[in-house]
Amino acid sequence: MFDEVWRSQGEDVAPGVAAALLHLAAAGDQPVLVVSRPRPPEAPERPRVRWANATLAALLGAAPGDLLDLAVGRVLRGADAPGALVRERCTRFTVEAVTASGEVRATEVAAWPVPERISGFGAVSERLRVDVALAAEDHWVLQLLSPDDERSRAALRAAEERFATLAQDSPVPTLVSDVGARLSRVNDAFASLLGVPAQELCGTGWLTHVLDDERGRVAQAVADVLAGERVVFDTRLRTSAGQVRWVTVRLAPSRTPGYGAGFVGTVEDVTDRRARENRLAYQAQHDLLTGLPNRLALLEHLGELLPDAACPDAAGVPLPPVHPAAPVGVLMVDLDDFKTVNDGLGPEAGDAVLVEVARRLVRTVRTGDLVSRPGGDEFVLVCHDLPDESAVEATARRVLDALVAPVEVNGLRLRVAASVGVVLLSGEPGGAEEVVRDVGIATHEAKAAGGGRWALLDEDVRQRARRSLRLVADLREALARGTLDVHYQPVVRPGTPTRPHAQLLSVEALARWRHPELGPIDPATFIEVAERANLVPALDAHVLAVACRDLATWRAEATAAGLPHVPRRVAVNVSAVSLSADGFADGVRRTVAAAGLRLEDVCLEVTETALASDLRACRTVLEELRRDGALVAIDDFGTGYSSLAYLVDLPADHLKVDRSFVRDLRGGRGTGAAGAARGGPARAVAAAIVSLARTLGLDVVAEGVETHEQNDVLVELGCEAVQGYLYARPMTREDLWRVLCDGGTLAPQPAGLPSPRQVPA
Amino acid sequence: MSVPRPRAGAAPPVPASAPGTSAAPGGAVEVLGRISAALDDLPAHRPVAARVIAQADDHRSDARSLGQTLGCDPALTAKVLRLANSAYFGLSGRVSAPAFAVTVVGFSTVRSLAVAAMAGLEDVPESLEEFWERSVLTAVAAGEVAGRLGVKAPDAFSLGLLARLGQALLVRCDPDRYPAVLAGAADREELLAAEVHLYGSSHTRVSAEALAAWSFPDELPAALAQVDAPGWASPLSVSVRLGVELSERLLAPARAPRPAGHLSGGRVDDGELDALRSRVQQVAQEMLRLLAA
């Protein structure tokens, strides 16, 4: 049938047939042409163009018709070279395409020989029922491979090969997937990491080396990278030798357009590093002497038990409140005389005791309970399932009993006693630190009760301890924000029976603290808090600064608005701690100068005790300030242990007679020795102090004057300045302002009749 | 010669004078004509699959656009998803979105499944016993050897899956005679000889022609055409050759095996090929279950 078709067309239609055949390619965007040359044994002739599509013509800058019958070597230099066009197979070669404008461009050509006879297969196309037995001429179809395409493809291939070469020789285990999770290539480093030939790892073979329980995670990571994310994860691989290696795998997505998505990955063997990290992590969580969990581990463990606790490694995952049915007990074991062992027998002996105690404690608890050594000679046990007080007691007893047997160290049998404090986790939210603090309080109680015993944390004790801890924090904050008040107690020239009103001379500045929630805090309490938290220097500095500022204000008012009376100076209390702090004198100078005052305007009140404790240092500081004009008063005089010898050298201007002497003063007016006897020993002491002061050239201020009787005695003794409730309690600056507006006179208000200006202290 | 079909980027015509084919005897032309008509008609019956095939070859496509198109054919989508979740692709149970499934199995495999759907291979006639088993074995085996030949495994896999497409077309277009040819052939070699005798062309050539008709990238039909042609073949073609060979060794143990070295120009030997047996069988079994489901 095909032969018939062929015969009906006749030999002369061969070029037309070829064109008809190839018009199919005309619509294509690939540059195509057909060439032919006479078949041997005809005279050898150069191949000529029989047909060209529009794309090829456009490429050469010509019309398709212009190219017909041209020797192909004229438009594609090199296409007629021997061996370029052969009958036996397809060929590929490079030619120089010559455009109409004479431009020459190197390009690659693929040439297919057109078969002599069409086979049955070609007839599949109903649209083209022609045979192409081209008897006289050999035909070839030539396709120019678009230079851009070729170049970019070559560049891509080169890049791929470069990458492959680099990866192949890289010491970093590398994986490549073209599509999906199936690897298309792995390098030698990865193969040698697992000890298997690279081929076995291609496809999904590599996944079989992932440990079973990790495979899901790895697959998920691969799914993520295929979805376009970069992923980094740690996992474990089993080598052919059965060894497990920890690896960090980093995968980066790689997409091939029109092909799919794969990834490129590196695998880092981190087994050794991980082992090191594990060791460090162990060390970070354990006490190296006893091998017990350390403070950090204890806090983490407690954090996990506490509802809503700020657990250090919770990593944002809120833990469900792991509150077991029966409460958890936290026991702190504090060795009673450990310091004696350590100091007396040396730290090695101390260590041996700790190790032995640790060993015994571990044996007293149940599985799941924790024995930790947060530090020093303290051990903390976290015991689960203590349903009632008898269980708590049994546990505490067990701990104490475990320590009864003497510990042998260097042949010596040492008796180790301990105090045990117990806290039951209440289920209230709170920090692990707080629990440890609470159990410390309980332990302290047990120790205070004589040692060798246990104590469950008492709620009152806890409240007290907690409150004081809270006060420290709040006081620190109040000082930092400068919200502490300063009240003033007037120092007055006392009234006499004939002239009962007293005249304000100066004021003593006193710190007062109104807690935002707890209300006014007793000064004794907060000063103790300040001492404990080392806040005294800050407190002193604050009071000095406020007092200086207030005095400067009053002075300014006196000049500008005619305030009738202004204190001569302000007195502030200075503690021994402040005095001995570096830069105290400079601080005072700066504060005073900043308020626009001079040192003469302030009086530093120092307790006798403070002076006694560090006399030399304090004296240097005080003398320096006195030399520049500041006044110094010895507070609470008579309560310390001042020897007369050093009194002479005291760097002071005033003595303040302690209230304890004033309190017992009785009226002794009238009759000589009998009167003195009636005034009692207090009067004698007061008289002696006043007289002593006068002898030394010091002024005297009597504190704590509450009654007319005390007042009168002091006046009689020649005391020219007093301070006390009889005339004024410490008052706010507003109240003092009113006193100053009234000219600074104060009417006596004997005890029992509260002054209208009273401020609760 | 094999006639280039009217389409952009015409494939290099497969030299038709290669041995293994001969001039078509009488009656063959009608069959081949019916096949040609079927190739033109089938896309209209499964338009979504046809669109998937076209898109998979378009460099502007990405997994999302291909997944979107795929999603319009629920049966095909289910098939791709099941395949993506097979152990072969390493992500069992993690693939639920069509676009992601496309990413996991690769465009080429999606395209092959679309061809299978379009050619009606989901429902092969009884006479094509073990059609899918052979096809999947061929695909898996071709994918496994691909790496040794420098071929991308997904390409070899997807082409292997379609190597026997021609058989289905022959059954459809010559229902009277082809089943008898199938039944009468003792082994694959006999079948090929009978096909060439009857139609002038082997079923792999018909497969190649179908791929060319459906606008597969040129190298794929060219490679399929070389599978049963003796002599030099592209590496992709060799991987399919070896895939076919291994599938026959597994399913027709009585048949005399053809030497792998000969089939691959010495690149893969029999030992290497046989070493893949159990893995290929295992993977293919799972995949077969998923594809048949």
Image (cartoon, coloured by chain):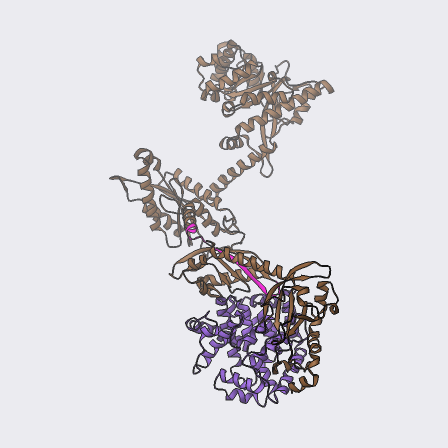
Chain colours: A brown, B purple
Residue A79 figure quarter: bottom right
Left or right position of A81 against B149:
right
Judge whether A374 appears above or below A132 on screen: above
Q: Disc count in the image? A: 0
The foreground one among B157 and B185 is: B185
The foreground one among B143 and B122 is: B143
- Report the residue at 67% width, 84% height from top: A6
- Report the residue at 74% width, 65% height from top: A62
Residue at the extreme left of the image, as rendered: A411
Image quarter (top left, top right, bottom left or bottom right) of the C terminus of chain A: top right
**Residue B120 coordinates in the image, percent (x, y):** 61, 80
The foreground one among A568 and A705 is: A568
- Which region of the structure is painted magenta? A257-274
**Residue A294 coordinates in the image, percent (x, y):** 41, 45
| Res A441 visible | yes
Judge whether A545 appears above or below A196 on screen: above
The foreground one among A552 and A594 is: A594
**Residue B265 coordinates in the image, percent (x, y):** 48, 71
Image quarter (top left, top right, bottom left or bottom right) of the N terminus of chain A: bottom right
| Res B87 visible | no
Left or right position of A264 against A381:
right
**Residue A127 coordinates in the image, percent (x, y):** 69, 81
